Image: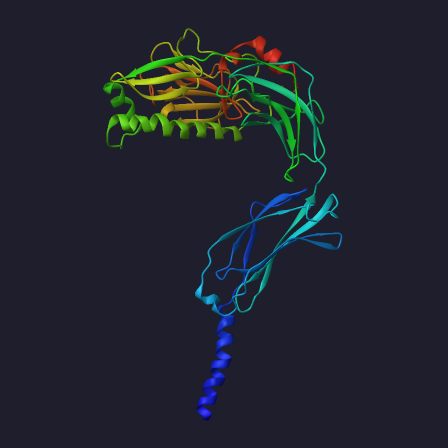
Amino acid sequence: MRTLAVVILLLVIAVPVTLLLLSGGTTLKLDPPVTVIGTLTPVQVRVENPHGLRRLTAIIEQNGTRYTVIDLKEPANRVTFWRKHKGLEIRRFQAGKQQAPALRDGKARLIVEAESNDFRGRTDSVEADVQIITQAPRVTADGAQHYINEGGSELVAFTPSGYVTDSGVRVGRYAFRSFPDPAQAGQRFSLFAYPWDLPGDIVPVVYAGNPAGAEATARFWFKLFPKKFRSRDLVIDDAFLEKVVNQIEPNGSGDLLTRFLKINGEMRRQNNKTLADLRWKTADHFLWSGAFLPLVNAAIESNFADKRSYIYKGKKVDEQVHLGFDLAVTQHIPVPAANDGRVVWAENLGIYGNCVVVDHGYGLQSIYGHLSEFAVKAGDMVKKGQSLGKSGSTGLAGGDHLHFSMQVDGVQVNPIEWWDEHWIKDRILSKVKAQ
């Protein structure tokens, strides 16, 4: 009997001890970080606990008062928790003045607490200092006239006020950043585009917002000049496929046409995204001056925003839009920098072959494709007219030529405007003192 009693006693002690040892805590992370809370601000928390949660509570603390904005409870599972294993969870909720009307604009603290769903039921928390912002920002656009070519560029100046962390111009689904005008305190400007693929009834607006989700917009006077972009057939044959496909994808295998269609579609989209992402590598001042240089004495083989239908053995097999000018002179001619700037890309880029991208500041960049060789490297400062390399037929090119394009904050635009000094003065420099 004594032995049995000892065994029972050991079991009585061992079971809760074991359950305690199997219990654990919760790892919490606000992702993305929360710095501002407004009327109703989305909050996302990464939760890691192998046993799950019994309770999740979010509190905003301000001036010694705690306001509960969410309190989620789940069934307790104190004993059988060890049978289950939870992975990473993402918990989302809204927090703000809508749940706690007594909140006032100013400093506060967001506290998220999690109670573990195991024997111990330990409570862990993550905290963040936040700013309560419920007053919407304001923005006033300039009073200038804005004549915009479809597929082209324009600049608008504006004055935001209030708590603003993000501002610029929105044109349909596209958004363009703004920059402070160093010559006008409190004023900002945005170099933006009216992209070639938008309908002609989109109204560009200036916007100013903050992380609390509050946003103000303002309209400005503009007139859009619609443009009719060309459509053309491009006949391709086996010799062309053999050349370009095996050059771009030397280790590939399979049917040439299938490989070409993947390059012409999927790779084209990837390459254009790489170009667009170079907008983050831009100077916060203008590096250029005067008109941009065209490639002189060049024959124009393709225009900006040409819609190409690819014809193979008498059948249309693909359709893509060509964003740039194809300019041909003779083989391997020096390719000049269109204007002063800094090289942000100088390497192979899929369909563009050997490609150079020059940043001119404030999101304005020029693109040079199909080069046969490089004369610069990333990081180099270049002057207008300086050789960047030589023309060639690398990438998706049937013959020796230069593919030239320009982009504004990652959106490719018709470069023909930037070759015109009068257009630059009227449409850009007349509205901003940053250069």
Residue found at the very far bottom of the displayed protein: 1
Q: Quadrant of residue 289?
A: top right
Q: Quadrant of residue 354?
A: top left
Residue nearest the observer in this picture, 80 or 208: 80
- Residue at position x 76%, y 52% from top? 63
Percent position (x, y) of residue 233? Answer: 34, 14
Residue 332 visible in this rendered orientation of the protein: no
Q: Which quarter of the image is occupied by the C terminus?
A: top right
Residue found at the very far top of the displayed protein: 297
Percent position (x, y) of residue 5? Answer: 47, 89
- Residue at position x 41%, y 30% from top? 270
Q: Which quarter of the image is occupied by the N terminus?
A: bottom left
Q: Is 257 displayed left or right of 92 in the figure?
A: left
Residue nearest the observer in this picture, 36 or 221: 221
Against 385, residue 64 (above or below) is below
Residue nearest the observer in this picture, 42 or 123: 42
Against 145, residue 245 (above or below) is below
Percent position (x, y) of residue 417? Answer: 53, 12
Q: Is 247 displayed left or right of 379 in the figure?
A: left
Percent position (x, y) of residue 159? Answer: 70, 25
Q: In which quarter of the image is residue 234?
A: top left
Residue 160 visible in this rendered orientation of the protein: yes
